[in-house]
Image (cartoon, rainbow, N blue to C red):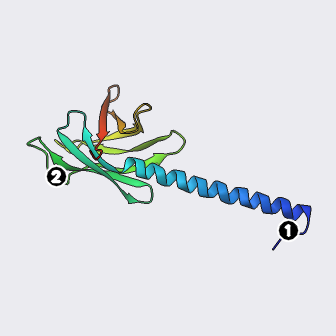
């Protein structure tokens, strides 16, 4: 069905652009999930985590192995992690393994290394803690 007038032609092209923008937005959101999900290890390599999507753009992180005697595999370290489009980062709650105390966490990808994420935790009122996780890549 071809457009019959100039107004119809403009509407047709506008709809094509809108469809393209919607598709591109959905594609970008799905690639974010693909980048974050997977297996990660702590900076000292003593723990291995798995980040997985538990709902639509909702993530969690679980300990899947650890060299630390007090850790238990399957412990949910991060819950309800969501992507903040405005701030271009993930935000959620991280729990201390030792006492299950929650802390607000902001996660972003290292600008120079896509296989490294930076976790910034709000501890107390003044002190922020920064933790790095590295993606486990197949070798």
The answer to whether 129 is drawn above or below residue 58 in the figure is above
Residue 132 in percent (x, y) is at 31, 34
Q: Quadrant of the C terminus?
A: top left
| 99 sits to left or right of 110 | left
Given residues 20 and 86, the one toward you in this image is 20
Disc 1 + disc 2, Cβ < 8 Å: no
As drawn, the residue found furthest toward the top would be 126
- Disc 1 residue crowd, few under 14, some 14–19, many 20+, Cα 10 Å: few
Real-space Cα distance between discs 1 and 2?
61 Å
Callout 2 secondary element: loop
Residue at left 20%, top 33%?
Answer: 44
Residue 15 in percent (x, y) is at 74, 61
Point out the frontmost of discs 1 and 2: 1
Given residues 105 and 9, the one toward you in this image is 9
- Disc 2 residue crowd, few under 14, some 14–19, many 20+, Cα 10 Å: few
The answer to whether 47 is drawn above or below residue 2 in the figure is above
Q: Quadrant of the N terminus?
A: bottom right
Residue 63 in percent (x, y) is at 21, 49
**Disc 1 target residue:** 3
Marked residue nearer the N-terminal end (1 or 2): 1
**Disc 2 target residue:** 73
Residue 18 in percent (x, y) is at 70, 57
Residue at left 67%, top 60%?
Answer: 19
Please give the label number shown on residue 52. none
């Amino acid at each position: 069905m071809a457009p019959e007038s100039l107004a119809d032609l403009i509407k047709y092209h506008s709809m094509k652009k809108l469809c393209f923008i919607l598709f591109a937005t959905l594609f970008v959101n799905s690639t974010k999930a693909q980048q974050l999900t997977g297996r990660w290890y702590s900076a000292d390599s003593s723990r291995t985590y798995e980040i997985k999507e538990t709902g639509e753009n909702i993530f969690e992180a679980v300990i899947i192995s650890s060299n630390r005697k007090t850790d238990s595999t399957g412990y949910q370290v991060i819950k309800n992690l969501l992507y903040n489009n405005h701030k271009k980062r993930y935000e959620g709650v991280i729990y201390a393994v030792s006492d299950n105390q929650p802390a607000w966490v902001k996660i972003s990808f290292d600008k120079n290394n896509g296989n490294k994420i930076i976790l910034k935790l709000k501890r107390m009122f003044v002190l922020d803690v920064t933790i790095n996780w590295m993606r486990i890549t197949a070798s």
